[in-house]
Image (cartoon, rainbow, N blue to C red):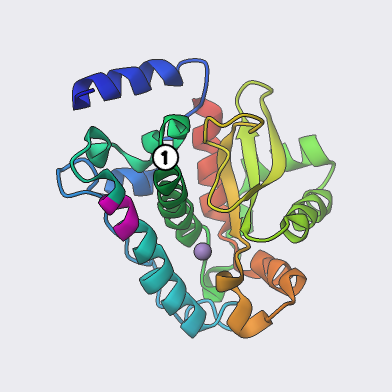
Amino acid sequence: MDKRDFIKTAAMASIGAVIIPNIGWAKAMPNGGGGGFTLPKLPYATNALEPHIDAKTMEIHHDKHHQAYVTKLNEALTGKPEFNVDVTDLVAHISSQPMAVRNNAGGHYNHSLFWTLLAPVAKQGAMAKAKSLLAAIDAKFGNLANMQEAFNKAATGQFGSGWAWLCYDPKAKELFVTSTPNQDNPLMDLPGMRNGSPVIALDIWEHAYYLKYQNKRADYVKAFWSILDWERANQLYEVAVKQ
Ligand code: MN3
């Protein structure tokens, strides 16, 4: 399959199957230019999330773990037409790919999104700019605390490594909370996956919190709410609803 055929097949498969969010960071990444996938820069300093996430964890997480997903994804796809496909399109059609691509494309997508959903403590107050998302949370969960309780339960209940999500389901036209194992995500066209556009994402691999929190995942999950960028989450929600 050449690149044109792959994109055509991907575009056809996306109709009625998976909603691909048109999110800013994906457009900013120079994927598709023939050079493969690249590691996006962190939008803040590694110590900007202190004391909730320590600088050393951010440095290793971004510079080593995320870089490894990018490197391995490029290795797996070099010479194939998917080398030049947007990572969002790639994860939405992941069922036809081998496990190495699934794990590393998921890892690249998930982390690229995750960095943009965290905000320095100094930026807090963004919740005032999340009115449409908060209204949708109230409509689905009754109130914010109920949604957070469901999210925390999904995050702490996911066995082993994975991610917790708040997503928008374009078919049901509602938000839902879920978790996924490993580097899977709710955009993936996998059996049993409830598809939706990610609005809030939390990495619950031990590499995301172990230096500071050790085995206390629940404390890390609780701290996440202090550094979530609500303005960014609201932006993702508004884009998802319009698609
Ligand atoms: Mn991670």
Observer-nearest residue: 214 or 176? 214
Count of picture labels: 1
The answer to whether 58 appears left or right of 241 in the picture is left
Find numbered disc 1 in the image and state the secondary structure of the residue it sits on: loop
Residue at image position (44%, 38%) is 91
Q: Which contiguous range is marked in magenta?
A: 71-75
Residue 217 drawn at (x, y percent): 72, 71
Residue ID at (84%, 50%): 146
- The percent position of residue 209, horizontal first and vertical second, equals 61, 75
Q: Quadrant of residue 4?
A: top left
Q: Is residue 65 magenta?
A: no
- Residue positioned 56% across, 29% down in the render: 241
x, y (%) of residue 221?
70, 66
Q: Is residue 206 left or right of residue 119?
A: right
Vertical comparison of 150 with 63: above or below:
above
Residue that numbered label 1 is attached to: 98
Q: Residue 159 location, x and y as percent?
A: 73, 57
**73 drawn magenta:** yes
User: Closer to the camera, 95 or 31?
Assistant: 95
**Residue 144 is at least partly visible in this image:** yes
Amino acid carrying mark 1 in the image: Pro
Q: Where is the N terminus found, in terms of image quarters?
A: top left
Question: Residue at image x 53%, y 30%?
Answer: 189
The reply to whether the residue tagged 1 has its Cβ within 8 angstroms of ligand 1 is no
Instruction: Please tell me whether the stretch drawn in magenta is mainly helix, strand or loop.
Output: helix
Within the image, what quadrant is residue 8 found in? top left
Q: Residues within 10 Å of mark 1 (few under 14, many from 20)?
A: few
